[in-house]
Image (tube, rainbow, N blue to C red):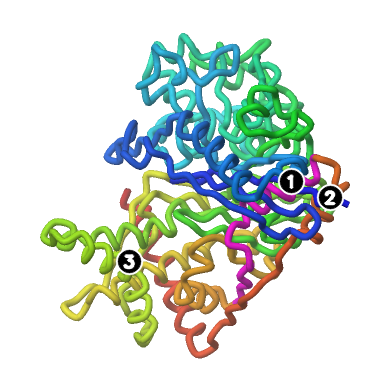
Amino acid sequence: MNTSYVIGVDYGTDSVRSVIIDAHTGEEKTASIFYYPRWKAGLFCNASLNQFRQHPLDYIEGLETTIKDCLQKSGPETAKNIKAISIDTTGSTPVAVDESGTPLSLLPAFKDNPNAMFVLWKDHTATKEAEEINEHAKKVTPDYLQFVGGIYSSEWYWAKLLHIFREDKAVHFAAHSFVEHCDWIPFLLTGGKKESQLKRSVCAAGHKALWSLDFWGLPPSDFFKEIDWRLDKMVGDRWWTRAFTADCPAGNLCNEWADKLGLSTDVVIGVGAFDAHMGAVGGQIEPYYLSKVMGTSTCDMLVAPTGEVKDILVKGICGQVDGSIIPGMIGMEAGQSAFGDVYAWFKKLISWPLDHLVSDEKIKNEISDKLVASLSNEAAKLAIDEKDELAIDWLNGRRTPDANQLLKGAIINLDLATDAPRFFKALVEATCFGAKAIVDRFNDQGISVKGLIGLGGVAKKSPYIMQTMADVMNMPIRIHKSEQTCAAGAAMFAATAAGIYSKVEDAMQAMGQGFDTTYHPDKTKTEIYTKRYGRYKKLGTFIEGSE
């Protein structure tokens, strides 16, 4: 009997990774990674404006390159037995498209226009528009923000759409709709020719675009038109009422892409979803366990049976949507706007002399590669005192609890004894305190967090940070074995969409790789961290009040 294989494609912030996985054992056969060349060159971005855009060609080239590389390395027999492909992406990362569903930046007139490109999740140019949506929502009934924590974020679909329309008349005139990255790639692979045929994912629609079955889809068109007349063109026959869970097929691989990749048109293409949501599945999420995908930012996912939590609305999180993670369960999302990015910022800060005064590239690279590990080792040796240096982790604003992308980071208690390891220790503690604030919000609102699951690069590579997390949370954190839980989760959904499994829980059970490390809280530190966390909250309240 031939083995069945599936492909999981994981679009991250800097790169896309594809993996071929045995649909019966979960064993990874091959993997390939592609770094976006235009993004790497800093094109179409302006960090001073919080503008971060990505060209669809980076996505298309990465998709073709990584899948073909995986197939070449695994051989022709594997290609014959590929049953399905599913993808995950960052989000909310939407793009303006024409009526055919083509991103405007793929048209000659818009090829170098950042406003015609995908607006990356971390783009915060739409803070004004998010504020207007929030103010308008307070004036109408019902509360259309009730399923997104009561606060609409500048990182999300409608705020970004409105900002682009206001800033660029040409894009506003040419746009037929806005489409999330996770919805557009399956549309591309299935050969979609009309935007109206595109299958929107319940994950993106529910968490970022205010879609809910309680509203029979999106809020009524008047809700948006009263915010700004420019949204008027998004209503009428362009209004989408249906959304699909990730276990559903989006269609089959079209002839064009079958020829490009050397695959059969029998290959099923699954409905897409966001990376953290599929990553939670790849990391074998359990009900009431907070699954923390820790990378540049964090996305914290929690699932609970619909019947147990259907009447609970958690304020200040990034949404709770039926079926957004596991069909048949309420999926809840929270997260921090900066996590690994905080450490990367500090590394860049202290590397200034290295970057500007050292000419030997080999020496530069050797030192740079050791910096965070060395800082972690030294920080781990430091004693903890209630009045140590104390930081706030809002260097890229605050996502949860209570989104506010205008907030800034801070640090206090500096003195002449403060060195780089002490500064780094304060930043690590701050990111862990920010994580604790999320757990506290769930617990306070009636969703009891039973435990923690750590996923992603930081979880796998940073024992000091994970031990600090366990100590601050006073809760064990299990680290999943898989290096690529997002791609693995996409593969599990691909296997389900192809009918190999009847539900994604069965795919998780068969294909999951289990856990390899558990960090337990150090009881000699938890009491001190409890006091320091209290100071963190007071400092955060002061910082927010002074904005």
Q: Observer-nearest residue: 169 or 26?
A: 26
Q: Residues at badges 2 and 1 in contact (C-beta under 8 Å)?
A: yes
Give 122 or 71, whichever is nearer the viewer: 71
Relative to residue 191, is residue 496 drawn left or right?
right
Residues under labels 2 and 3: Cα distance?
A: 43 Å
**Residue type of the residue flagged with mark 2:** Asn
How far apart in space, not on screen, are marks 3 and 1 (Cα)? 39 Å
Tag shown at residue 2:
2
Residue occupying the point 33% across, 57% down: 409
**Crowdedness near tag 3: few (<14), some (14–19) or many (≥20) residues, C-alpha within 10 Å:** few
| Residue sticking out furthest to the left | 357
Instruction: Identify the disc placed on residue 77.
Output: 1
Q: Can I make out residue 134 in this image?
A: no
Q: Image quarter for residue 345? A: bottom left
**Which mark's residue is nearer the viewer, 2 or 3?**
2
* Residue depicted at x 29% and y 62%: 346
Residue 264, image x, y percentages? 74, 32
Query: Percent from the top left, x then y, of residue 425?
Result: 35, 74
Q: Label 3, secondary structure: give it.
A: helix
132 in relation to 230, above or below: below
The residue that mark 3 highlights is: 369
Q: Outermost residue toward the bottom?
A: 524
Q: Which residue lies furthest to the front in this view?
A: 76
Mark nearest the camera among 3 and 1 is 1
Q: Residues within 10 Å of mark 2 (few under 14, many from 20)?
A: few
Mark 3 is on which residue type?
Answer: Asp
Task: Report, in whole angstroms, how far the alpha carbon at label 2 lies from the one at label 1.
Answer: 9 Å
Q: Residue at x 39, y 56 (%)?
A: 341
Which tag, 2 or 3, sits closer to the chain's start?
2
Amino acid type of disc 1?
A: Glu
Q: In this image, 457 relative to 324: left or right?
A: left
Does any portion of residue 101 appear in the rendered image?
yes
